[in-house]
Image (cartoon, grey):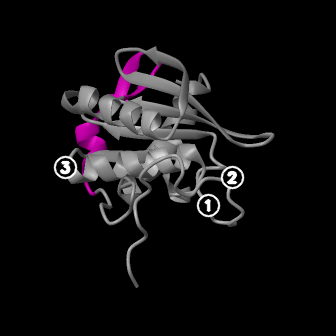
Amino acid sequence: PSPTPLPRGPRDHTLVESRPRALTPVESALRRFFHVLESRRVPVLALRGGRKSPHYREVTDLDIALLPRHRARVEEALLRSFDRFGVIVVTRQASRYLVQYQAYAPCGPGRHHHLCIDLTIAQACRGVPYMFPSDIFRGRDSRQIPPRPGPVQSAMLDFLGPFLYDGSV
């Protein structure tokens, strides 16, 4: 089987078409984004929301871990991919360990797609980091697009975030 061709622009595979598996502009932009990062050998991991790739319609939040030295390159690739597919950045919020984008794109008459994308430099709770990219990238599954953490790191991330935020610590 031949690989699925990469979307090139807003007219390629959007929900305006009647095909049931057509990609939204947001999904097409993310597919392009991950392809660009892979071709430039910029390592990232999908901490949350990546299992639905390339269809993100049911996902409201996509968390991506990256190394601090790649932050500018990752943001540039994301914004260029958004621009290419007509995705609008509604808001951008940045802190020391996180850059968050609220993205939106119309998908045809009465339809739209909204997605929150978190670019994570380190997992932090109330501004205090508890897991850094070097820890998260160990044992990653790079056969997945987007790549995901290994099972141990994934389980720790699923457990630690809610545990630390519920006030028990």
Residue 6 screen position, x and y as percent: 40, 60
Residue 95 screen position, x and y as percent: 40, 14
Q: Which residue is mark 3?
A: 41
| Residue range (magenta) | 123-139
- Tell me which numbered mark, 3 or 1, is placed earlier along the sequence: 1
Q: Secondary structure at mark 3?
A: loop
Q: Residue at x 38, y 63 (%)?
A: 144
- Tell me which numbered mark, 1 or 2, is placed earlier along the sequence: 2
Give the residue type that dot 3 points to. Answer: Arg
- Tell me which numbered mark, 2 or 3, is placed earlier along the sequence: 2
Neighbor class of circle 1 (other Cα within 10 Å; few <14, some 14-19, many 20+) is some
Q: Which residue is mark 1?
A: 22
Q: Residue at x 32, y 36 (%)?
A: 77
Left or right relative to 35: residue 102: right
Residue 20, visible in the rendered structure: yes
Q: Which residue is mark 2?
A: 16
Q: Is residue 25 magenta?
A: no
Instruction: Specify the quadrant that holds the N terminus.
Output: bottom left
Neighbor class of circle 3 (other Cα within 10 Å; few <14, some 14-19, many 20+) is few
Residue at mark 3 to residue at mark 1: CA–CA distance: 28 Å
Q: Secondary structure at mark 2?
A: loop
Residue 49, visible in the rendered structure: no
Residue at mark 2 to residue at mark 3: CA–CA distance: 33 Å
Would you identify the image quadrant in which residue 168 lies?
Answer: top right
Observer-side mark, 2 or 3, equals 2
Residue 64 screen position, x and y as percent: 41, 40
Would you identify the image quadrant in which residue 131 lies?
Answer: top left
Observer-side mark, 1 or 2, equals 2
